[in-house]
Image (cartoon, helix red, strand yellow):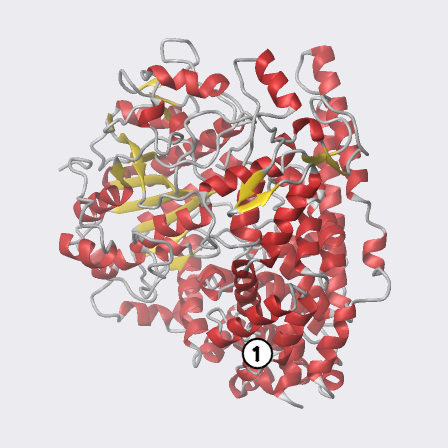
Amino acid sequence: MRTDAAIAANRFGLGARPADLQKVDRNPQAWLLDQLQGPSRQPGELRSLPDTADVLVEMQDLRRERRDMRNATEAALAPDIVKAYGRTIRRHYLDQSEARYRLAARSDYPFFERLVHFWSNHFAVSADKQPMPALAGLYENEAIRPNVTANFADLLIACEQHPAMILYLDNQRSVGPGSRLGRRANRARREREVGLNENLAREILELHTLGVHGGYTQGDVTTFAKVITGWSIGGAGENARFAEGEPGHFEFRDAIHEPGAHEVLGQHYPQKGIAQGEAVLRDLAAHPSTARCIATKLARHFVADEPPQALIDELTASYLESGGELTSVYETLVGAKAAWAAPLSKYKTPHDFVISTFRAFDHVPDSTRFVVGALDLMGQTPFRPGSPAGWPDTADHWGGADALYKRIEWSNTVSRVVGSRINPVELGDAVLGPTLSAESRKAVSRAESNVQGMTLLLASPDFQRR
Amino acid sequence: MLSRRDILKATGMGAIAASLPAVSFARANTNSRFVLVILRGAADGLAIAAPYGDANYSKLRGELALPSPDNGGGLFKLDGMFGLHPSLSGVFEEYGKERALIVHAVASPYRERSHFDGQDVLENGAANVGALRDGWLNRAIAPLGGSLGSEVAIAMAQNTPLVLRGDHSVTSWAPSRLPDADDSTLRRLEAMYAEDEFFAARLAQALKSQEIAEGQAGLDQTKSRGNDAQQMRTMMQATARFLIAADGPRIAVLEAGGWDTHANQGATTGALANRLSGLDTGLMALRDALGNAWSQTVVAVVTEFGRTAAVNGTRGTDHGTASVALLLGGAVNGGRVVADWPGLDKSDLYQGRDLKPTADIRSLFKAVLSEHLSVADSFLNRTVFPDSGAAAPMRDLLRG
């Protein structure tokens, strides 16, 4: 058994299942690259989920019902309507979390799944803003998953035009002051100007593409915000001012789009309508700052908190030479010596850790609350990084003392509740291969019970790293 | 079943802690407590302490403007210029007792508008993003002693925020709902981790924190969920328990999110009012739970930057520059607003849109570290806040 097999399954994948390493060992690199095509049909876990549009319409109906009731009685809201709204959101959130973690626990395409999670975090919509808990998992499957091996520009556009992202960063509220509706509204109502909201434009530049030092100014943010005014969602909004477009789907609203040509990062954009924003996004995708930003994040995610500069350079070059073809970048990553040089150089995030425990036990969790609750305690509530920057990807964030203690408690709990029939030493050899250290192996072998042995294995430094 | 305290004894941890050289905090130079509360997301200083006396305020803020103190249900009157948000009744009570102080138009040296970089500068203590990889509070505690098992500082979170990260050992704690691992398992883990410094140090810290948390009656660990106010109250009560434990930490850092009010910010009620109400509940819970130790306490509530002076097109405010900082506690020389008020006229605003900073937040931190925690000025300027010579410590913030 080669160390490379363990690296492939644990660092690039989501953690080995007991029978995986034997298979991977034949050709670890090929095992990874073969996964890039992704599963030929949609995984069963995802098939029963609704579409974003269905959920948005459902939520809107509930909100309307709530508003009607308030208008009718002018009394406090009927508690069951409030409860129904919260319950509906919670149900969608749990369904989507369940689908994500069940699929991760059993997938035969763990490298592909890891990339889905990576990009979902790069383009994060955080479930701490309503109604994101009901959308974040759908967004991952609709905008990220189909584009994980596409050109970065396509992934970028799919994310920025997804209703979840529009809502998360308030773009449906952003009105061009010189647009038809903007001018009319500001003439009619002097007390409150309707206008731009820079949120989405800023985060696209800062987080999704160029990076914060990527060479843009406050002026670029404001102009780019104007360019993407009108990127909205179809159907009647909260104020029912517009009703065009398919309810719950992305909709370009010309009436609030700031007209005219605009200049972003020194480039002139004479296009009209939605094409203008798409042209800016394509140029951003092709920008060298974006290439470097993506290369650095990938290298940090897969190799080390402080990745080797040569590897970042190699990935950047691959990105630029291929014109942002993500598959080329992944191939470069998997082919890079640096990516295989040092095993166990990354401290797992709680998300990585929890998924890898289920895979080690070859168990698909049926209680989502168990998974969500555990991740919540370890500081990584599913789909809820708390900001559009997503979760940090370094040990100095995840390495708190209390966080380790929670991992130990989880190791103990999951070993008791789930466990494995395989004896803990054999299990350690099976899922960690040569990366299980002599110290850990000894500690596991001397455990007083199977449960304790499994707890020690999961809590071992070797299992906690990848 | 054994308690964590018994385990520490059984494993010799207690004995190790007791035999450490004379660096435990109780024997260090102070019994002063310091609590840093970071409001992540850029809290709106112009709503927390509203300049109702500035003629431009209500014009700029439109429907977000808070009613002046003379109107019922409006701002709490701080002085002829500033009023405190109506959700902060507890803070106002402390203000009346001269134990709360507001510093206005204050900012870190950061002048862009990224949350993440803004927080990086607020916490790393340097003049630039990424200039230092550790936090100023971690560097500051070096002279205060403390060591593995008797750390002087605690992060009240699963994961340590940047401000407390660094070479100096700190601990962390957050409520749990998982059952404990048994003591035999913990002992074996200690042995297994012995060769791995990263894991060994963290487990030792965690066991020590468990000991304090479990040694105190009344903290219901199952209550880590709930609304903002409940969560804040639980966390603040737990913080107090750590800070008054005989050999516990004396410095704590808490974080609270949800201040990025781009849309529907609200005025006397609404999203921001709810966040402030939760904060106020938490601060008062901390005061009450600290008991007598409140007189030796300074709480600093800070944020990475402020928000635009004017309301935006979506009834909210966008990323700005200067904001407010609150100081609270028995050691604070309060009952005042400290501000070199820059004004809200368009020409007075930073880049024509934000409250202009006239004070450096490092001046406030320096004053607290120097006067309250007795950190030497030369150390502050050289190590804790390098390149901060121009930011002299603010004077008279604390009681002499």
Quadrant where the C terminus of chain A is found in the figure:
bottom right
Question: Which residue: 61% across, 22% down?
Answer: A182
Q: Nearer the viewer, residue A39 or B40?
A: A39
Question: Which residue: 44% across, 18% down?
Answer: B65
**Whether residue B293 can be seen here:** no
Residue B83: x percent and y percent?
34, 20
Q: Is residue A421 above or below residue A268?
A: below
Residue type pointed to by label 1: Ala
Residue B313: x percent and y percent?
55, 26
Return the chain for callout 1. Answer: A
Quadrant where the N terminus of chain A is found in the figure:
bottom right
Q: Secondary structure at mark 1?
A: helix
**Whether residue B38 can be seen here:** yes
Q: Is residue A428 above or below residue B148?
A: below
Question: Which residue: 20% across, 36% down?
Answer: B397
- Tell whether A205 sits left or right of B61: right
Q: Nearer the viewer, residue A162 or A12?
A: A162
- Tell whether B339 sits left or right of A466: left
**Among all residues in the image, which is located at the extreme bottom?**
A1
Residue at numbered disc 1? A339
Residue A237: x percent and y percent?
72, 27
Q: Is residue B284 above or below residue B31?
A: above
Quadrant hosting residue A198: top right
CA neighbours of label 1 inside 10 A, class few (<14), some (14 to 19), many (20+): many
Residue B121: x percent and y percent?
36, 50
The number of numbered badges drawn on the structure is: 1
Quadrant hosting residue A29: bottom right
- Tell whether B183 sits left or right of B305: right
- Tell whether A223 sits left or right of B140: right
